[in-house]
Image (cartoon, rainbow, N blue to C red):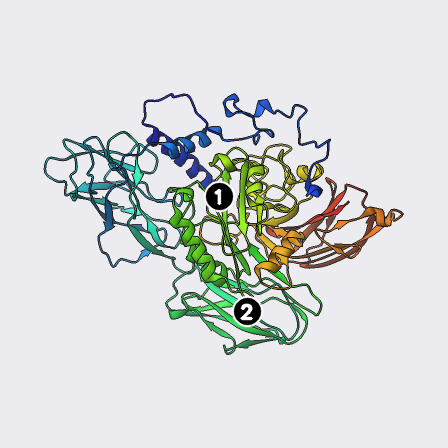
Amino acid sequence: MKIVLPSTTSTPLNAAAWMFVLAVAIALAALGCGAENRQGPENPLLPDDTATSDLRDPSLGDLSAGLSADAKLETEALLQEDMAAPRSPSDGGGRAWRVASNTIHVAGRRARIEIVFETGPLGIAEGGAIFLQPSPFWEWDPPQASLPEAPGFTEVLDLPDGLEIELDDQSPGMLIAWLRGRALQPGETLRFIYGAGELGVRIDRYAEDQTPIYIAVDGDGDGIRGFIAHSPRIDIVGGPPAQLRLILPTTAVPGQTVRLTVSALDIHRSRSPVASGSVVIVDPPPGLVFAPVIEPVIELGGSFGGSRTIEVKIEKPGIYRLEARGQGELAGLGATSNPLIAREGLPALAWADLHGHSQLSDGTGTPAQYFAYARDVAALDVAALTDHDHWGMKAMDNQPAFWTEIREAVGRFDAPGRFVTLLGYEWTSWLHGHRHVLYFSDRGEIYSSLDPRYETPDALWNALRGQTAMTFAHHSAGGPISTNWLYPPDPVLEPLTEIVSVHGSSEAPDSPLPIYNPVPGNYVRDALNAGYRLGFLGSGDSHDGHPGIREAGASAGLAGIFTPKLTRESVLEALRARRVYATNGARIFLWVELDGMPMGSLTDVALNAEATEQRLQIEVVAPKPIVRVDLIRSGVSMAIPVDGQTELNLDRTIPALRPGEYHYVRVVTEGEGAAWSSPIFAR
């Protein structure tokens, strides 16, 4: 499908497309971008007129299930136009490098960045242009040439004889150097000083290796640019330590040795490069033995780089919470761990973040940094990196090297029994909503949402059918774009939905920290009421390089997966069985069963048609006091107030579920931490 918008401006196609797309991207970054699942004949999500002509532009052709109610037609059209734009062989020609510097760049600080550009073998015509652009996502000062006293002031020096440059800083986030007077010949150079004024330029607020400063070239002056092959890059380290994190596993059995992860982070949760400093565990409980530390005092400085994992042996059952305080460089900082529950017969719980982004699309950090943070700082058990198929500065669906880099990182970090990594990407449809695709093997393809062969959810599922893969709809109630629930989720490939992320909760209007820009009637609870059988998981959708770590008071997302083994095969089996629950980033333990059947189960009412009651059992262990437990049955919510305890066991009878009904549990704690069990469904 091709979307064509009427021309309203004389601005060249490529420049107009990228100015609009970047404006959308910057706005989104500020906010955070079998039959049993099929709908019945009276699905309330389907309008009376299933042609949904009111939802789409007539030029889009015939789509059997319409579009998302808030489909972004202009964004889709401009992405398609940019992808199809004819590029001259000289577009994207040349190379650039950063002038050597021993400066250590600290996240969020100011810098002066000097870049030399050398013209490629085809030169740049008079009227052509060179574009200088940092990442638009993480508060870089945009380059500007108008105010020397203001941040981001940029000069272009060492011009070849006879060349004039017209600097244009009116496009969002970039500086365009238009060539006047003559062409640039092959091999000629010029020099950009980005941050030439006294205030320099404020750089990425997050630590990041190999941060690109993008250089693009319009070689023939037609307004269509191409990026040079290799952008100049800088490394950014974290800032001073501002917080401590202690993370324990949530479940264990007596006699087991587990890992305690201790980290010193800066104000934005990047790992802080601690020179010297340590953490002492305050009043360590007698049921735990720490090794190899003494007292126990945990050194974090020097070669430890601000983060360290030590072994802790559990000698007897109990619920453990550790407190720590910093010493030396970390003096004045303190932290309390999440609770660890140790007892026999407890199902093993793995924490996962299955959705996040790197610098290869609209995030920060490299794929290797992403997985290292997930394992070594966030202490996750399972992680997936899901960069966009076609979104960001360079689109992955036409940059094969990006997919190769992600695949290599996934393979390098996967360690069954210790840390499971999954290959994935985000199918970024601005017509039907966003989904991430996960592969549970070493290989998988990118089926781009801009490819006419895969532009609808059904087409995507048809391409994935038979593979060990899953898809997950996210921010489904609104945010960047809502999910088009008119396509019933495939029961094998999509038995779960991401109910919460950095964008907020899509569960229901009464949810804690709800999503922005919601579409009424498009919440996950509406999809359940329509007859879709979907389990719940949370994911970070992190763009800041910090999967698995929630910022205080903010929405995020984690998936609690009950899996006996840490392998791809076991995780896949648990997800398909909906043996999973969601949190908005808080490490809350939640166990729910109905007549002995765990969350996510599909009950057969016909086997016990005479039953009038069922036994509902709920166990919660939370890091913060519990405010209430909500019982949600077929769209109706009943709140059970809780008196501030952090541990809760509820055992009660409820009227037996009738055919077509569902039941799930929502837990809310102080600070709006929340957890949602996957529903139990009555067949």
**Residue located farthest toward the left when viewing the structure as drawn:** 161
Local secondary structure at mark 2: strand
Q: Amino acid at mark 1?
A: Gly
Whether residue 541 sits left or right of residue 190 in the image: it is right
- Label 1 with label 2: CB-CB less than 8 Å: no
| In-front residue for pair 510/451 | 451
The mark that comes first in sequence, 1 or 2, is 1
Q: Amino acid at mark 2?
A: Arg
Residue 32, disc: 1
Residue 218 against residue 662 in the figure, above or below:
above
The quarter holding residue 145 reads top left
| In-front residue for pair 189/373 | 189
Local secondary structure at mark 1: loop
Is residue 115 something that shows in the picture?
yes
Quadrant (top left/top right/bottom left/bottom right) for the C terminus: top right
**Residue 601 picture location, percent across and down:** 73, 51
Judging by the rendered image, the residue that carries numbered circle 2 is 259
**Residue 57 picture location, percent across and down:** 52, 23
| In-front residue for pair 377/127 | 127
**Residue 275 picture location, percent across and down:** 37, 67
